[in-house]
Image (cartoon, coloured by chain):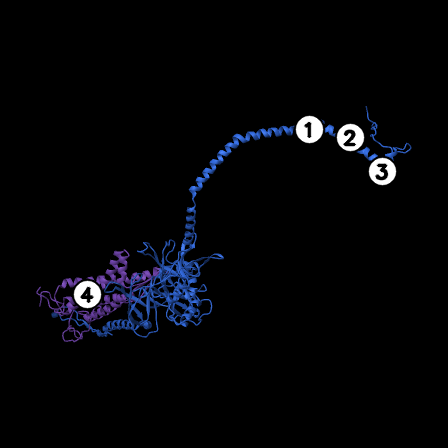
């Protein structure tokens, strides 16, 4: 029994919706809170009571892997076609960034690069780190890891920037012969990547960070 | 589908905490793995479709990658995209550019041995503008596929578009020329001033002594290229001054600027079978040369002129009885130690074939006589007959000379060495030199005239004449004057005597009147005597009615009406 007891050690479980704290019922296989075959509901609001998000790690892994698989074609396939009078240009994300940089708008290039390369990669790395460390129940840098998770949650939406840019340009730039912007399959995969990483970070339970062996604190 | 249980009242000893109720979960957690599986399937399908669509990868080496763009530049065959450049890098030796091209699946047939690739860029030449569309769309790589089925994935790109695409109907021929002139790839080939083909390529001969051009003549006009066709460079402007005046002959203005080749069959009987593919022809400099009878192999001859050959230049014609049979190729000074003179050695190329049938006959004659039909032997015989080379004035205005081979009568015999190499033809002084000689002779004769003694004698004579004239003036002329005075007086006297009112005249008149009267009376007398001859004896009859004789003129009647 540590100084900082966990709810599970005290046989307590809190409802994440209405905040009601319940006690486990030892003996009842559904209500003993041992994590096996549990099926509990909040007696006050009826929402499911869970000590942790179910299968959080597996789900997060699955979604993260799916997102990563989608991220490959998103980067390889061109996301946007800009056609002008003398030139048809298919740009992937990276080549678009390079083109922006060359065309003399480095700020824009940095923004696009951050939103479409840095952020997804950061998410993959961050979620992967969180998953691995919580799977191993390590006590390493727990507060920082918690902050990292919150950061991942925060920046999730901004990755959609690219998709918005393509959508906006496609809608705005339509001068038939003179210039034309068309979305290409890459942008769909990119959108899927962003959505899947958001789901992945949602399905991760940050409380897992604090599980496992406490270090000598 | 939750089966909620009523929360039991919590035992107080266990703290007043509610118990959770049982809830059935109906979602199998493992289903979440469908999502990555699906993603993997999508990814795999992309990879597989890409792999299925991908054709062969080929590498084209080019001199420069100007206008090419990795990932963008298309490869086109008949303006259909069959692939795309996906990488451009330098070769290991940095001498050329390697362009990786991903061909499409459908264009696998282009990765064969005799496929040609070239970069289509806008080209502006005198002959026209090509590839203008690439100004807007950017350069692309053109392809032309051959018949080979042998796989090949490394190509050497052409620097210029091939002017003949594979399988185009027509034939190509080879032309040999001394130099390229103003021709270029794509220069037109004309037949009767209609463009029927173009120059496909050119290259230096291996020995560097000429240029070989490949031309392509489109079907069906390739049938006009016969075995005896003559090709000439139509780039030039042919200005000829003939008996009809000045004529200017060109193919077209564009040809003059950009060059071109024309061909035509020679006049007269000739072999009119169409020439086979890749037949070799000679490219002549102009139409006149091309249409001339074939020259055959040239022979080098040498002539040794003892006098100045000012005005004789390289390329000056060599004429035999007025027919051009060759040209001068070299002029060199020599030194004759015995005579202490500087003779000029003139080298010339002559084309015996230009003598035409004469040459054939001479050859036949030589063979018939059992001699070797060698040119030097023949020339030897001709030299014995008086054949000599002579530098003659071809143009009085410019003083240019030409070499005339002619039979000079009454020329001294010379020793002719038929075995000498090169063949040396004896010379006689030129026409102008002869003129000079004759002039010199005249001058000599003039020199021989004794002008001094002539002048001296003339001087003396003139002096004698002077004294004579003085005598005449001083002595003779006054006497003559006096004489003339006398004559004048005499004439005056005569004038006086002959004047109308002179006494001489009056006396003469009276005398004549007297004579008249006398004559009248004589007549009367004679008449009377005629009638009365007896009167001489008897005298006059008294009764005789003598005819009244008007001896005197009746007195003039007073004029009536005259006023006093």
Q: Are marks 4 and 1 on the same chain?
A: no
Question: Which of the two discs, 4 and 3, sits closer to the camera?
Answer: 3
Q: Distance of mark 2 from mark 4, alpha carbons?
A: 190 Å
Residue B515, above or below B307 = above
Q: Distance of mark 1 from mark 2, alpha carbons?
A: 21 Å
Question: Percent x, y for residue B527?
Answer: 84, 36
Q: Is residue B469 left or right of residue B556?
A: left
- Mark 1 or 2 closer to N-term? 1
Question: What residue did someone put label 4 on?
Answer: A125
- Are the two marked residues, 4 and 1, in contact with CB atoms closer than 8 angstroms? no
The numbered dot on residue B497 is 1
- Mark 1 or 3 closer to N-term? 1
Question: What residue did someone put label 3 on?
Answer: B530
Q: Does dot 1 land on a helix, a strand or a loop?
A: helix
- Are the two marked residues, 1 and 2, in contact with CB atoms closer than 8 angstroms? no
> How many neighbours does mark 2 have within 10 angstroms: few (below 14), some (14-19), or many (20 or more)?
few
Q: Distance of mark 4 from mark 3, alpha carbons?
A: 199 Å
Q: Does dot 2 land on a helix, a strand or a loop?
A: helix
- Can residue B388 be seen in the rendering of this structure? yes
Q: Distance of mark 1 from mark 3, alpha carbons?
A: 42 Å
Question: What residue did someone put label 2 on?
Answer: B514
Between B434 and B564, which is closer to the camera in this rendering? B434
> How many neighbours does mark 4 have within 10 angstroms: few (below 14), some (14-19), or many (20 or more)?
few
Question: Which of the two discs, 4 and 1, sits closer to the camera?
Answer: 1
Q: Does dot 4 land on a helix, a strand or a loop?
A: helix
In the rendered image, which quarter contains the C terminus of chain B?
A: top right
Of the chain colours in the picture, the one used for chain B is: blue
Q: Are marks 3 and 2 on the same chain?
A: yes
Between B194 and B459, which is closer to the camera in this rendering? B459
């Amino acid at each position: 029994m540590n100084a900082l007891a966990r709810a599970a050690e005290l046989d307590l479980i809190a409802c994440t919706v209405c905040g009601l704290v319940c006690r486990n019922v030892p003996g009842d296989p559904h209500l003993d809170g041992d994590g096996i075959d549990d099926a509990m509901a909040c007696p006050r609001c009826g929402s499911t009571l869970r000590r942790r998000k179910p299968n959080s790690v597996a789900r997060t892994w699955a979604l993260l892997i799916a997102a990563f698989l989608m991220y490959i074609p998103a980067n390889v396939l061109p996301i946007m076609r800009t056609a002008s009078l003398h030139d048809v240009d298919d740009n992937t994300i990276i080549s678009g960034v390079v083109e922006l940089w060359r065309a003399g708008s480095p700020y824009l290039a940095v923004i696009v690069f951050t939103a479409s390369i840095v952020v997804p990669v950061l998410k993959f790395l961050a979620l992967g780190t969180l998953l691995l460390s919580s799977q191993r129940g390590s006590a390493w840098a727990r507060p920082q890891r918690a902050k990292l998770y919150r950061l991942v949650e925060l920046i999730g939406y901004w990755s959609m920037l690219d998709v918005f840019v393509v959508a906006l340009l496609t809608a705005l730039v339509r001068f038939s012969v003179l210039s034309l912007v068309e979305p290409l399959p890459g942008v769909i995969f990119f959108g899927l990547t962003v959505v899947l990483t958001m789901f992945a970070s949602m399905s991760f339970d940050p409380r897992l960070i604090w599980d496992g062996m406490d270090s000598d604190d | 589908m939750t089966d909620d249980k009523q929360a039991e009242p919590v035992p107080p000893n266990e703290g007043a905490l509610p118990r959770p109720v049982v809830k059935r979960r109906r979602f199998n957690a493992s289903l979440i793995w469908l999502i990555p599986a699906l993603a993997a399937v999508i990814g795999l399908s992309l990879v597989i479709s890409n792999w299925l669509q991908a054709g062969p990868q080929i590498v084209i080496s080019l001199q420069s990658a100007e206008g090419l763009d990795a990932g963008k530049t298309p490869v086109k065959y008949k303006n259909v995209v069959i692939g795309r450049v996906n990488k451009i890098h330098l070769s290991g030796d940095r001498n050329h550019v390697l362009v990786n091209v991903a061909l499409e699946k459908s264009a696998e047939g282009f990765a064969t041995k005799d496929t040609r690739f070239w970069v289509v860029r806008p080209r502006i030449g005198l002959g026209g503008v090509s590839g203008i569309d690439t100004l807007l769309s950017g350069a692309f790589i053109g392809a032309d596929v051959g018949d080979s089925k042998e796989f090949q994935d490394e190509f050497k790109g052409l620097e210029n578009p091939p002017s003949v695409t594979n399988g185009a109907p027509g034939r190509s021929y080879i032309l040999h020329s001394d130099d390229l002139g103003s021709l270029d790839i794509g220069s037109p080939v004309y037949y009767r001033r209609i463009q029927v083909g173009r120059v496909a390529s050119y290259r230096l001969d291996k020995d560097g002594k000429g240029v070989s051009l490949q031309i392509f003549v489109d079907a069906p006009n390739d049938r006009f290229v016969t075995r005896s066709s003559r090709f000439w460079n139509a780039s030039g402007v042919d200005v000829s001054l003939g008996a009809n005046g000045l004529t200017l002959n060109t193919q077209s203005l564009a040809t003059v600027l950009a060059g071109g080749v024309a061909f035509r069959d020679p006049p007269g009987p000739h072999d009119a079978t169409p020439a086979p593919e890749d037949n070799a022809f000679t490219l002549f400099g102009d139409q006149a040369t091309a249409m001339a009878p074939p020259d055959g192999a040239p022979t080098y001859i040498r002539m040794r002129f003892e006098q100045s050959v000012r005005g004789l230049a390289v390329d000056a014609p060599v004429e035999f009885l007025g027919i051009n049979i060759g040209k001068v190729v070299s002029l060199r000074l020599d030194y004759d130690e015995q005579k202490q003179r500087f003779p000029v050695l003139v080298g010339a190329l002559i084309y015996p074939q230009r003598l035409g049938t004469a040459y054939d006959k001479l050859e036949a004659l030589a063979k018939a006589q059992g001699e070797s039909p060698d040119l030097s032997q023949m020339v030897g015989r001709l030299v014995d007959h008086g054949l000599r080379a002579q530098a003659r004035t071809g143009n009085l205005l410019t003083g240019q000379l030409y070499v005339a081979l002619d039979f000079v009568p009454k020329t001294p015999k010379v020793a002719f060495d038929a075995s000498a190499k090169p063949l040396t033809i004896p010379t006689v002084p030129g026409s102008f030199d002869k003129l000079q000689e004759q002039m010199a002779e005249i001058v000599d004769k003039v020199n021989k005239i004794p002008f001094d003694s002539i002048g001296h004698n003339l001087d003396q004579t003139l002096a004698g004449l002077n004294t004579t004239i003085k005598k005449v003036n001083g002595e003779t002329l006054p006497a003559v004057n006096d004489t003339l005075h006398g004559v004048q007086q005499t004439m005056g006297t005569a004038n006086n005597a002959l004047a109308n009112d002179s006494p001489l005249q009056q006396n003469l008149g009276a005398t004549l009147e007297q004579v008249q009267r006398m004559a009248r009376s004589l007549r009367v007398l004679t008449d009377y005597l005629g009638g009365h001859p007896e009167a001489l004896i008897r005298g006059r009859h008294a009764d005789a009615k003598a005819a009244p004789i008007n001896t005197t003129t009746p007195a003039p009647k007073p004029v009536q009406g005259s006023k006093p």
